[in-house]
Amino acid sequence: MNSIYSDIQRSILNNEKLLAVLIDPDKFSVENVTSFFKKVNQSIATHIFIGGSTVEDKVTEVLVSEIKKHTKRPVIIFPGDVSQITDKADALLFLSLISGRNPEYLIGKHIESIPILKNTNLEVLPTGYILIESGKQTAVERVTKTQPIDRSNIQKITDTAKAGEFLGMKLMYLEAGSGALNPITNKIIAKVKDEIQIPLIVGGGIKNIVQLESAYNSGADIVVIGTAFEQCESFFDDLKK
């Protein structure tokens, strides 16, 4: 069986752009899974990310179990905390918040997760996570008590991404934050993509097809959309296969 990471690499080599639908268990009801995933399955979405900054225990596992009944797309945990890890999913983004300096989110939570991960078959995907200023304070900023990198400091953003790659990260995630006022700029995406050799994920603040295409054209390999779907499921109409 091919790994999810290998499939991502293969898609990039074939110039295929990937789209992850991000679902926050704290904001999404299990009762909506059937109708929501009818639209997901008819769209160009390739991956499902599950996670949020603050989610009650066991909620993620229940939601993932239900989602797996309705789609064959890979379900990947995008954890805000160790409590969101469940072996009902296919993989886990092993996020290190390399834009911040809070040791809990650089390595502390990772150590805490090991006893859980050792008892799962989850594919673990080491991911550098870079929070970039987006015009408002985000949940990630509040929960992790870290400051985002100023969007005007492109050199620092680029150097941080390259440092993450040198540390052995397999994916790099540029995050504007859920409900961001401004998505990651084309210039930032292009500069980071030009610097690193690993797949680039971009998320936060993307609200329409124009912004989605712009992110792809600037170099994003995977674009993550969450809030836009929460607020308007008709967005899927623009994303049909």
Image: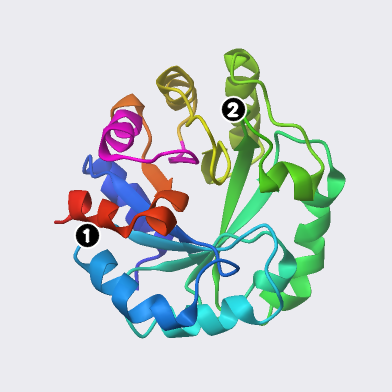
Q: Is residue 241 left or right of residue 101?
A: left
| Picture coordinates of residue 143, whole percent (x, y) | 77, 50
Magenta-colored stretch includes residue 33: no
Task: Please report the bounds of the magenta region as a residue range.
Answer: 198-216
Is residue 35 placed above or below 172 in the rendered structure? below
On the image, the x and y values in percent for residue 117 come to 67, 73
Residue 205 among magenta residues: yes
Q: Which mark is residue 158?
A: none
Q: As drawn, is 239 to the left or to the right of 126?
A: left
Tell me which corner region of the image, top left, top right, bottom left or bottom right, holds residue 26. Answer: bottom right
Residue 191 drawn at (x, y percent): 46, 19
The picture quadrant where one finds residue 162 is top right
Q: What residue lies at 82% left-to-right and 36% top-to-bottom? A: 101
Q: Is residue 177 visible?
A: yes
Of the numbered discs 1 and 2, the one sitting upstream in the chain is 1
Q: Amino acid at mark 1?
A: Ser
Quadrant housing the N terminus: bottom left
Q: Does residue 149 lie above or below 227 as drawn?
A: above
As drawn, the label of residue 162 is 2
Q: CA distance from mark 1 to mark 2?
A: 33 Å
Residue at (30% x, 43% y) in the render: 12
Q: Which residue is mark 1?
A: 43
